[in-house]
Image (cartoon, rainbow, N blue to C red):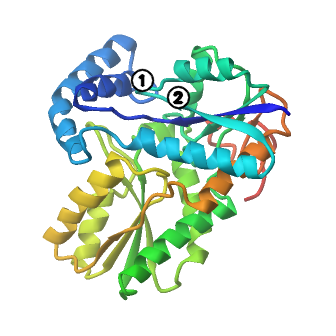
Amino acid sequence: MTKTAIVLFNLGGPDGPDDVQPFLKNLFSDKAIIRAPAPIRFFLARLISTTRAASARANYARMGGGSPLKPETKKQADALDAELARRGYDAKSFIAMRYWKPYAADAVREVKAWGADRVILLPLYPQFSSTTTASSLKSWKEARGPEGVTVCCYPETDKFIAAHARKLIETWEAAGCPPNVRCLLSAHGLPETVVKAGDPYQWQVELSVAKLRPHLPAEWEIEICYQSRVGPLKWIGPATDACIEKAAKDGKAILLSPIAFVSEHIETLVELDVEYRELADEHGAKVYLRAPALGVDQDFIATLADQVEAALAETPGAIRSSCGGRICPASWKDCPNHRPAVAV
């Protein structure tokens, strides 16, 4: 039977307090994150990692000292392997983190040692961005990873959307179905300059939300927002914190979902659950609910398995979206999928 290696890409996070500063340095040294010449970028990476280390350690301390992202990704890998085994495949998932261990080079060694016949490169970023998916794929190539079939994005798939809808509705129902809901769908932000240069991430987030809307109660107000702003540049908006403040002042029941995050980590467990909840309370919110990230939700794991199955029909070196062809309009030049466009 053909042995298929699935490489799951994610950002990574520090394992403990001593890892926080080097993790931040790795993050801000990436030219996909700070688009400046190398000397300036490395200076800024040292500066930011030094000045932010103490506050970041304090936030990670709230989660036990380190990021839960690696164990959460391992659970997803195990769930995906079980689903693929159920479908009759000899497949094994390997984790390649971008800014902390296990790095892409670690995954390359493991994939080669396992003796994979086929490799599927599967980012755990449903919406493509040059700052996440492209950067992770670049790290795989630089580590001399075996050529594989790349899944570039899956922002609009039925099961992915169904999983988000179910998490939101279950969270609302568990709170007693409060009325007057404003549903805030929060994604990680990007500097405006990145989007204007051709990054399709914001467009794909909006596509995810457009597909999600019909699955939610018609009386809910739906709003997209963006979190985790860093530095002095202007970022895409509206900002999640500003939307929470306005919703609280408007007397809305706030129901929030991390629409572009598939695992619990610092942006969900601290930023959304602690910092933004405090903000909502300060501005008089009576209801503040947060739907969980998808994690090992059955529909989300099935989404990943569907992407693997479709990719197995492709030739190594191919890049495919969830629908095969290019999802993004031609104006988004950072999209790596150069096949004919497909209506979604």
| Camera-side residue of 329 and 118 | 118
Spot occupied by residue 97 in the image (x, y as percentages of width and height): 48, 30
Residue at image location 64% in from the left, 47% down from the top = 80
What residue did someone put label 1 on?
Answer: 30
Count of numbered badges drawn on the protein: 2
Q: Please name the amino acid that badge 1 sits on.
A: Asp
Callouts 2 and 1 close, C-beta under 8 Å: yes
Residue at image location 22% in from the left, 76% down from the top = 285
Image quadrant holding the C terminus, namely bottom right
Image quadrant holding the N terminus, namely top right
| Camera-side residue of 140 and 78 | 78
Q: Please name the amino acid that badge 2 sits on.
A: Ser
| Camera-side residue of 76 and 227 | 76
- Marking on residue 135: 2
In this rendering, position of residue 290 left or right of residue 277: right
Spot occupied by residue 15 in the image (x, y as percentages of width and height): 33, 32
Spot occupied by residue 37 in the image (x, y as percentages of width and height): 39, 15
Q: In this view, does 117 lie above or below 269?
A: above
Residue at image location 83% in from the left, 32% down from the top = 2
Spot occupied by residue 13 in the image (x, y as percentages of width and height): 37, 35
